Amino acid sequence: MRWWTKNALYDTCSLITLDKLLIERPALARHFPKRILALEKSFSADQLREETVQRMQDRVTHQELPPTNDLATILTSAGLPKALAEVDTLIYATSVHFSLSVVTGDRQLARAVRDAGLQVGNMAMILRELVQSNKLAASGCERLLRALADRNELLLGSPSPTWDELEQHTFPDR
């Protein structure tokens, strides 16, 4: 089983990207768990559009937060970057407390999770793994990357992403 399909907590950006991927290619759903983990905070109006909430709600199990005293202990000892969003600090603390992998688009959060000794990645890495395991053709993946770019989702930072770029993609350090 792949790291993102078992005990992985998805951040808000990854929920948005997964939603867009499933709009473009609904058959990709079979490569993800029937229910993915996310924080309820990710579904608030300041995080997700209502139409995204509607589409993703049935795919998500809301992960509980750590108890308040554990949350405070984790956050005070973590040394997280000040620029990290509130929801991302909660994702970090939850992943550490429950030993969950994290799927995130935020490099700062990814580094913090990795430094805590947990598995971390992003949606681009998942797409690459699907191609490498022959679950998705490289040409189909490239079409998906371009469709995402057309929706202003620049997974690789490029408006015209290619499979070659995805093959070379590293996260979170570059």
Image (cartoon, rainbow, N blue to C red):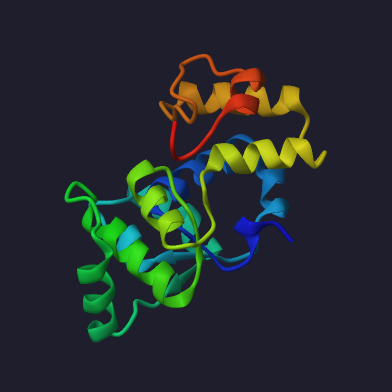
From the top left corner, tell me how far across and down residue 35 is, in percent: 58, 66
Q: Is residue 69 above or below residue 155?
A: below
Residue projecting furthest to the right: 134
Please name the residue shown 70% across and 41% down the image. Answer: 129
Q: Residue 57, percent across and down?
A: 47, 62
Residue 54: % across, % down = 43, 56
The furthest residue to the top: 160
For the image shown, how many numbered marks are present on the structure? 0
Q: Is the residue 125 above or below the residue 78 in the image?
A: above
**Toward which corner of the image does residue 32 lie, by quadrant?**
bottom right
Residue in front for this viewpoint, 116 or 134: 116
Q: Residue at x 31, y 56 (%)?
A: 88
Choose top left, top right, bottom left or bottom right for residue 6.
Answer: bottom right
Q: Report whether 132 appears left or right of 61.
A: right
> At x 60% / y 34%, what residue is drawn?
24
* Left or right of residue 65: residue 55: right
